[in-house]
Image: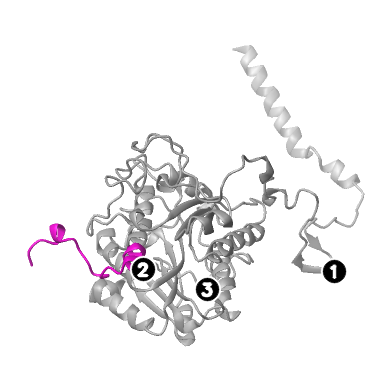
Amino acid sequence: MIRTLFVATALIGLATVGAEAQVNKAWVDEAPKEERAPMPHIDPEQPDRMVIRQDKATNIWRELRDSARNPERTPGPIDIQRYQVQLESVGIKTFFHLPVALNQEDLVAGKVDVAIFGAPTGALPHSAGAMWAPAEVRHTRDWGGYGDPKFPLSWLEYETLINPFGSLNVVDYGDAGTNPYNQSHTLEEIRRMTREIAETGAIPFAVGGDHSVPNGTYRGIVDVYGRKNVGFLHFDVHLDRGTGKFGAFYHSGSYMNMAVEEGLLDGKEVVQFGMGAPAFGEDLYDEILEEGGHVYHLHEILRDGVDATFDKIYENFKDVELIYVSFDVDVFDVAYAPGTGSSEPTAMIPRELFPQLREFAATKTIVGFDIVEFNPYYDNKGQQTARLVRRIMFQFLTGIAMKKDGVDPKYIHPRVSGKP
C-alpha cells in the first residue's frame, strides 16, 4: 500500500514538471532561423506549377521487354490453354479464357475484331482498389466458359442464344503499363495502347480502373478516327463533369469537359444516361445543355421507361455512326453492384438495361469501349460485381457480333421469347 502511494506521488510529480517545461521547447528556441526549403515538386519561381522529376527510373515501367527472347513464331493470337474443354477453375487466366495477342502484328494476322485490355488505374481514394479490377475480372467465377470460347457449350447470351465468340475474333491484349506515382504517365500509355489497337481496325475494350481512363482511351480513339467524328455515350449514376478535384488535372470528372473544350468531341454528340446522384449543381447540367449535350436522369428514365429513353438516344445520335461507350458500373444499384467506390442505392437494375445495351451495339458502330470503377476490395465473396462486369461486356460483345453478322438488333431467340 505504501509502495503504491509512493509511485502515484512520483507520477504526479513528473506530470507537474512536464507541465512547467515542454520537452523540446528549449531546442526549438535555440534552433537556427533559416528560410524554409520548398517541397521538391514546387518551383519557387512558379509555385502553381508542378515539377516532374525525370531520372533513369522515370520510364522504366513502360519499357517493353525485349521480344528477341521469345521463341520464333508466326504472328497471330496465341491460345495458351491446354484443354479443349475445361471449367473456369482450370487454366491460365485471360478475359473469357480468350487467346492472347502481344502486338499489332498479332492483331492484323488474326483479323482481330475486339482486343480487351486492362487499364489498371486508381486515381481517387475511393478508386484505389480499382487498380486490381482487370486481374479480378480475369479470375471471376461464373457459369460461362467450358474451354475454347468458340466451343458450342461455352458462352451463350441468354436472350439471343448467340455465342459472340463464334463470329468475332476476340483476344486478351494484356494490360497497359501503370505508373502508380504519376497518373498522367499512365494515361499516356493507355492512350498509346488504345491507338495501337484501333489502328488495326479492332475495337479497343478497356477494363478499368477508375473513371479517369477515358482521358487516355477516348484520345486514343480520336487519334485514329479524327476530331469530332466519334460520339460519346456515357453510362453512370454520376454526372462526372467539372474540374477542381483538389487541383488534379486528370480525374473522373474531367474527361468530357476537356475533350469538348479541346475540340476533340462535339458537345452535341455527348449523351449521358443514368444520373441519379445528388452531388452536382444545376450549373453543371446547364453547361452540358449549352454545349448541346443530352442528360437522362434516373427520374426521367423510370418515368418514361428504358425503351423510350433509348429511342431518344438513337435520335440524339441520328447523324453519328461511330460511338465510344464509357460504362461506369455504378450506373447499377448498389444491391447489384456493391463492388464500386461510389455506389448509389437509387440506380438501374441489370435486367432493365441489358437488352438495350445489346441492341445499341448491334445498331451503331462501336469503335471504343471502357468499363470502369469496379473495385474488387468492395465486392463480396461471391464476386457479385465482377460477374456483373463480365455480363455487361458480354452484352456489348453480343451486339457487336450481331451487327457483324447482319442480325436484327431486336432479335430474341424464339425459344426464349415464347408466344406473343
At label 3, counting other C-alpha atoms closer than 10 Å, the crowd grade (few under 14, some 14-19, many 20 or more) is many
At label 1, counting other C-alpha atoms closer than 10 Å, the crowd grade (few under 14, some 14-19, many 20 or more) is few
Q: Is residue 374 above or below residue 25?
A: below
Comparing 299 with 166, the one in front is: 166
Q: Are marks 3 and 1 in contact (CB under 8 Å)?
A: no
Closer to the observer: label 3 or label 2? 3
Q: CA distance from mark 2 to mark 1?
A: 44 Å
In the picture, the quarter occupied by the N terminus is top right
Secondary structure type for disc 1: loop
Q: Residue at x 56, y 79 (%)?
A: 227
Q: CA distance from mark 3 to mark 2?
A: 18 Å
At label 3, which amino acid type do we have?
Answer: Met
At label 2, which amino acid type do we have?
Answer: Gly
Report the magenta residues as a range: 399-420
The residue where tag 3 is placed is 256
Query: Which numbered circle lies on residue 88?
Result: none
Looking at marks 2 and 1 on the same chain, the residue that comes earlier in the sequence is marked by 1
Q: Is residue 94 left or right of residue 27?
A: left
Query: Which numbered circle lies on residue 276?
Result: 2
Looking at marks 3 and 1 on the same chain, the residue that comes earlier in the sequence is marked by 1
In the picture, the quarter occupied by the C terminus is bottom left
Is residue 286 something that shows in the picture? no
At label 1, which amino acid type do we have?
Answer: Glu
Q: Are marks 2 and 1 in contact (CB under 8 Å)?
A: no
Number of marks drawn: 3
The residue where tag 1 is placed is 45
